[in-house]
Image: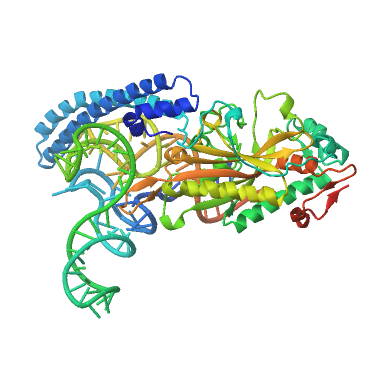
Amino acid sequence: MLDIHYIRANKELVIQGLQKKYFNNAAEAIEKLLVIDQQRRATQWSADNAAAQLNQCNKQIGQLMQQGEKKEATAAKAQTTVLKSTIRTLAQQLQVHEETLQHALYELPNLPNAEVPEGKSAADNTLVYQSSEVLVNDAAQWPHWELAKKYALVDFELGNKIMGAGFPVYKGRGARLQRALINFFLDEALHAGYEEIQPPIVVNEVSAYGTGQLPDKEGQMYQLKDTTFYLIPTAEVPLTNLYRDEILPQEALPIKNVAYTPCFRREAGSWGRHVRGLNRLHQFDKVELMQIRLPEESYKSLQEMCAYVQRLLEKLELPYRVVKLCGGDLGFAAAFTYDLEVWAAGQQCWLEVSSVSNFETYQSRRMRIRYRDEHHTTRLLHTLNGSAIALPRIVAALLENNQTASSISIPPILQPYTGFKAIE
RNA sequence: AGAGGGUUGGCGGAGCGGUUUAACGCGGCGGUCUUGAAAACCGUUGUGCUCGCGAGAGUACCGGGGGUUCGAAUCCCUCACCCUCUACCA
């Protein structure tokens, strides 16, 4: 959420930022917001004044009662009737204005950081790094869904039977490969200083608002019937909300948490070419990193997290590239994002396997995640997160890149985790 | 799931209709004393919003929401959560 005080003082900058993100009718939205804000403040001023008068009256009545001046007290009571009804009316108006303003603010995305490149879509993202040798593997002729079938690693039909499309069943060595990756990613994160967390994978509405999934992504989460609870689309939601309404001691910073969770996404309306096999699922596993850090240091964390995910991909010997998202491709709540993509030789395409973002104060303002500075003033912290890493596409890339005519080799670093060196 | 008891500031813990301007203690910060420190003593100490250049002023907040009352931390209703006992379960 953006700061209304900031918007008031930096109207043009805010509009420019929103336009960089290709937010529709930015200028109009901000003008409207400022009108609501003006109304809200005027109403609050009136309401506060009326309340101050009433408080004075009540104090007098109290004194009169104690002095036994019942007649005067009764007379004074009459005065309060008008004030009370005025206050009631104003308070109702104020509440409406506050809610309107709040909703308007919820609809505004975060502003992009100054370093974010201009651009409208993924095509305009900036390439930051690309592995030197993108595999030219003549044997890599099959996409992973064919390989998964051939070696009986993933059964998509069984998933259809018990749930529906997008809920694959991993079997045998496929299941073990998945579990191996989870353990590998968690162990690596532990060594990098992250605390392991097992959060709930269902969250309440407040939590979904906190990280920005609501109201923006309403309809993309699975909601439990007759409740306002949601299956998490990412561990980011419970992890970051662990610190909601906390004033964190500076010694505790930076907070570094890691969690493995299943993730659920309805992905409504996304049909077609790129959704085959493991490319896009309704349920998938992910290991997620989350950091909370001082504002002036948060971009160090972003670099650190991005470099960390790069090391993981290198350890898995996967060819990858890093792109800096342009304004138009940035997520709703993000101020800056690096995407990491691995090369899938069987499909001859790049698959996004990680997204590392700095939300600056966008989430922490919604959640009131703060610290005390040297002057004992409470200030908002910055929140960040990054996938490390989303499992299915890593599995896809491993299968496709490491295939031979008769087997799939497992990268050496994973072998202690899988217990087998190849799938034959 | 049933019965009962709870939820107060950074923490502990009073308050049960009107100097609550939330006692008291601990912790934190500042100061006095001291070569320095400790102890002691003195002062200070929450969050949001509004107004103000500022000093500051106003207002709201005692788990959430609603009600009674001139006035609610205090009384009533309701929801959430916690604890104890009983039942059940992995």
Q: Residue at x 45, y 32 (%)?
A: A111
Q: Residue at x 51, y 49 (%)?
A: A301
Q: Is residue B50 left or right of residue A408?
A: left
Which quadrant of the structure image shows residue A420? bottom right
- Counting every numbered tag in the picture gives 0
Q: Is residue A163 left or right of residue A215?
A: right
Colour convention: rainbow
Q: Residue furthest right?
A: A406
Residue A194 rendering spot, x and y as whole percentages: 57, 54
Which quadrant of the structure image shows residue A142? top right
Residue B10 rendering spot, x and y as whole percentages: 37, 54
The one of B51 and A67 positioned closer to us in this rendering: B51
Vertically, is A57 above or below A378?
above
Image quarter where the N terminus of chain A lies is: top left
Residue A28 rendering spot, x and y as whole percentages: 40, 19
Q: Residue at x 32, y 23 (%)?
A: A93
Answer yes or no: is residue A258 visible. Answer: yes
The one of A116 and A48 positioned closer to us in this rendering: A116
Vertically, is A73 above or below A243?
above
Answer yes or no: is residue A198 visible. Answer: no
Residue A81 rendering spot, x and y as whole percentages: 20, 25
Vertically, is A382 above or below A119?
below
The one of A161 and A82 positioned closer to us in this rendering: A161
The one of B43 and A353 positioned closer to us in this rendering: A353
